[in-house]
Structure formats: C-alpha cells, structure tokens
C-alpha cells in the first residue's frame, strides 16, 4: 500500500501497488501528453523517503527491452492526480527529472550450450 497526501487537502489516500502498475503516465497539461506506463513501484522502507514510480518511457507502440526507465517520486507536488478509474496518472515533473533515465540490464547465465574447456583438449 502506498500512502500519498492529496494536493487539494491534507487527507491521505492509499493505493495498492497492483492498482498502480500498468497505469498510463501523462503530463498534467492541456494535451495530457503520454509519457509511458508504470512498470513497478519502489517502496521506501523509511518514512522520510517517498515511494517512487518506475515508469517505462516507451519509444514505440509496444514495450521493448531498449525502452528507457525513469523514477518519479510519488509526492503530491509531482504526482497531483492518480485516477485508478481512468487508468492514468498525471505528473508535473520538475525540470530535468525526465532526463534522468536508465535502461535495465538483465544478465542471464546459460549453462550447457558451450563445450567445456576440458572437451577442447
């Protein structure tokens, strides 16, 4: 469960992580430009640090392993609207936040496909 203060009041809203994953992330502007989708939620173990949304910035119509990811702090100033019914999150990122992207690299170890060094002798 991810608590967040709403921008309009001091009331705390809570979201299930499973409700947030897969939601569209859009800019909080007139056009609501599409940025990507929530890939995961990084939960904080410390009350002083906020939970963050890991967002896939999709380059094409389908997700790809080459897509960049960005972390968005789940705070009312940056994430003013979470609309579970409409399946979207509106964000107001500070300048430069969307430039802090990274690509996830997964390492896979495959055994048994290459001959062992002993077989080559």
Image (cartoon, helix red, strand yellow):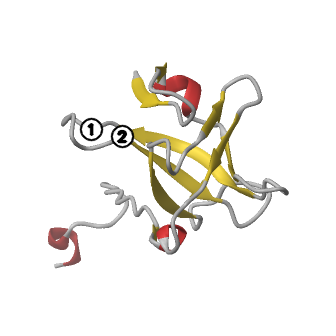
Residue 85 picture location, percent across and down? 74, 22
Q: Earlier in the sequence, mark 1 or mark 2?
A: 1
| Closer-to-camera residue (6/96) | 6
Which of 40/50 is in front?
Answer: 50
Give residue 45's position: percent from left, percent from top: 20, 34
Residue denoted by label 2: 51
Total number of numbered discs in the rendering: 2
Name the residue located 41 percent from the left edge and 27 percent from the top edge. Answer: 2
Check the image and name the residue furthest to the right. Answer: 31
Q: What's the residue at 16%, 79% (across, down)?
A: 121
Q: What secondary structure is marked by label 1?
A: loop
Direction from residue 92 to residue 112 in the image, left or right: left
In percent of width and height, residue 83 lies at 68, 30
The image shows residue 121, relative to residue 58, as above or below, that is: below
Alpha carbons under labels 1 and 2: distance apart: 5 Å
Using the image, determine if residue 52 lies above or below residue 82.
below
- Residue at image location 21% in from the left, 40% down from the top: 48
Query: Crowdedness of circle 1 by 10 Å Cα count: few (<14), some, many (20+)?
Result: few
- Crowding near the residue tagged with mark 2, few <14, some 14–19, many ≥20 C-alpha atoms within 10 Å: many
Read off the residue under disc 1: 44
Cβ atoms under marks 1 and 2 closer than 8 Å: yes
Taking the view exactly as shown, the residue that stands out farthest to the bottom is 121
Split into 4 quadrants, where in the image is the N terminus?
A: top left
* 76 left or right, relative to 57: left
Vertical side of 45 occupied by 13: above or below: above
Residue sitting at x 52%, y 31%: 6
Q: Nearer the viewer, residue 63 or 27?
A: 27
Image position, residue 110 (x, y; %): 34, 56
């Amino acid at each position: 469960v991810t608590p967040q203060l709403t921008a309009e009041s001091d009331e705390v809203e809570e979201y299930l992580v499973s409700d947030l994953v897969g939601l569209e992330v859009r800019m909080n502007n007139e056009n609501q430009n599409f940025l990507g989708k929530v890939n995961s939620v990084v939960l904080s173990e410390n009350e002083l640090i906020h939970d963050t949304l890991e967002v896939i910035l999709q380059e094409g119509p389908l997700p790809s392993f080459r897509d960049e990811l960005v972390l968005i702090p789940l705070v009312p100033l940056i994430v003013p609207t979470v609309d579970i019914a409409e399946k979207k999150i509106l964000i107001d990122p500070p300048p430069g936040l969307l430039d802090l992207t990274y690509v996830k690299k997964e390492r896979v170890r495959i055994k048994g496909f290459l001959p062992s060094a002993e077989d080559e002798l």
